[in-house]
Image (cartoon, rainbow, N blue to C red):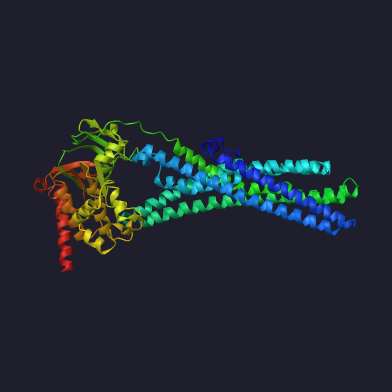
Amino acid sequence: MMIDKRLVGTVKESKKYIIANVLLQWVSLLANITMMATFAVLLQKIYTQTAVSKTYTITALIALGMIVIRFCCTTAASRMGYLSSKTVKRTLRELIYRKLLRLGTSYKEQVQTSEVVQLATEGIEQLETYFGAFLPQFFYAMLAPITLFVVLSFINLPSAIALLVCVPLIPISIAAVQTWAKKLLSKYWGQYTALGDTFLENLQGLTTLKIYQADEFKHQQMNQQAESFRKITMKVLTMQLNSITIMDLIAYGGAALGVILAATQFRANHVDLAGCLLIILLAADFFLPMRLLGSFFHIAMNGMAASDKIFRLLDLSEPEHKEHLVPDDCTIRCQDLSFGYEKDRQILHQVNMTFPKGSFTAIVGESGCGKSTMASILMGRNQGYTGTVTVGDTPLCEISEQSLMESFTYVSHQSYLFKGTVRENLQMGCPDGDDTMFWDALEKVNLAAFLRSEQGLDTPLNEKASNLSGGQCQRLALARALLHNSPVYIFDETTSNIDVESENDMMAQIYQLAKTKTVILISHRLANVVGADNIYVLEKGHICESGTHENLLKQNGAYSKLWATQQELENYTKGSTL
């Protein structure tokens, strides 16, 4: 089907703009018919030498009037197309946004972020053409030949019938490639989103790939995916070129047939010169609307392929509504907790942890042992785990996401800072906060002096605060977290990849925060967790040790070995510096 009923029904507001667009094009067609008829009559009078000065004047006035009407109709039709596409973009993006809110932070378990981004941007841009151009042209392409047939049937019925009969050849050719095109474009979008997902994943993990010397492997993998995408793109372009060629042959062949029929009927004295000329002038208009529809067809099919994926996103199962709040006793307990991103590869194995209310607990271990996975589970982002996680006596899976976000503050090494001002970013942590509170938080993270030398709280930030250093970004993220003032804080490698001064300042604030809040610190640098009340050591997803820093050193186990290695490396680095 060339019309997706669910898609059109989803964006009901666009219907009035589509109808208005079609009517405006139809009025423009009537104006064109009037103008062509006027010219045909003028040429006949010139041929029969009956034209007078008044004839030229009337013809010129009519032509001018019809040109003005056509101009107004074309401009208004473009405006209707714009309003229709604007409605589509607003409606569908709002639906996607609200769906993601309902899915919650665990949406990534069902759909990749890169696919959501691609659908919400380019996918909907393709639908802009579908609603703004294809659908109006589709209905106009049905209406225009019928209108022309009615007009020309009064001039010469055989010519009108012949032209009308040839028009369906174009939609027949479109329908012939539709089934193949739908499968091909569905495959195209599948590979496109997969390539985007791989690119985003590799870009975000580029540092890790470099460290483990896996960048060359990923480079080759991306080259293979890019080559597959190139091949299917060429198939799509080949299909489009071939179908356009066929439609051109039908359209211009039909127009040529109209010329031949007009000449034949004129020679047989079945039509006068004016009628003959009018048939010739309007013959192409029988086919051009359908030909233009064909040029929109492939973009529309691409948009419909994207809409299939959009509706697949909108149809994802949503978690049940949760009404429980985070209890006052926010002690967190994990019992026999196991989790894996893939069924055959577990990340966490039978993990038992307790984070008492008001305690300072650290989770350490080598990269890939499951530390950040633990943080994601506690924040509700990963939900497909086995075992139990409770906050107080309430299972984590029964706590509403809003309550969880209000009570748990998560700060990572890549905390997102939005484009805007420093004040606007701080207001996300405390919407009702005043400038005094903001400056107090900035003083705590030693960022106030720098901002005072700039534009204060009105200092503009680029996307991701790219105009600040890494240390300044993390300081600002910590200030925002402090303003949130929640009972539980989770710091996930917050001090990674920043300068030593910023790291020391931030750790000082984290230790200060741990005096009044429940703090969970995930860190690769053991020097940062020395003062923790309890330290869990993860090794390949298992808890191999736990205890205070002093007790763990006495055990001479995994923690002691990591500590010795890091101390040796830091001492060597200091010696090299000296």
**How far across and down, in percent of the image, does residue 454 sit?**
28, 63
Q: How many marks?
A: 0
For residue 399, side relative to residue 173 (left or right): left
**How far across and down, in percent of the image, does residue 38 sit?**
79, 52
Q: Residue 5 sits in which quadrant? A: top right
Picture quarter with the C terminus? bottom left
**How far across and down, in percent of the image, does residue 447 sit?**
22, 58
Point 82% across, 44% down: residue: 159
Q: Is residue 132 visible?
A: yes
Residue furthest to the bottom in view is 578
For residue 173, side relative to residue 80 (left or right): right
Q: Does residue 329 sit above or below 276 in this rendering?
A: above
Q: Please tell me which residue lies in front, 9 or 227.
A: 9
Q: Please tell me which residue lies in front, 318 or 286.
A: 286
Q: Is residue 242 visible?
A: no
Picture quarter with the N terminus? top right
**How far across and down, in percent of the image, does residue 261 sit?**
83, 48
Q: Residue 464 sits in which quadrant? A: bottom left
Q: Residue 215 sits in which quadrant? A: bottom left
Point 16% across, 38% down: residue: 357
Q: Does residue 283 sit above or below 8 in this rendering?
A: below
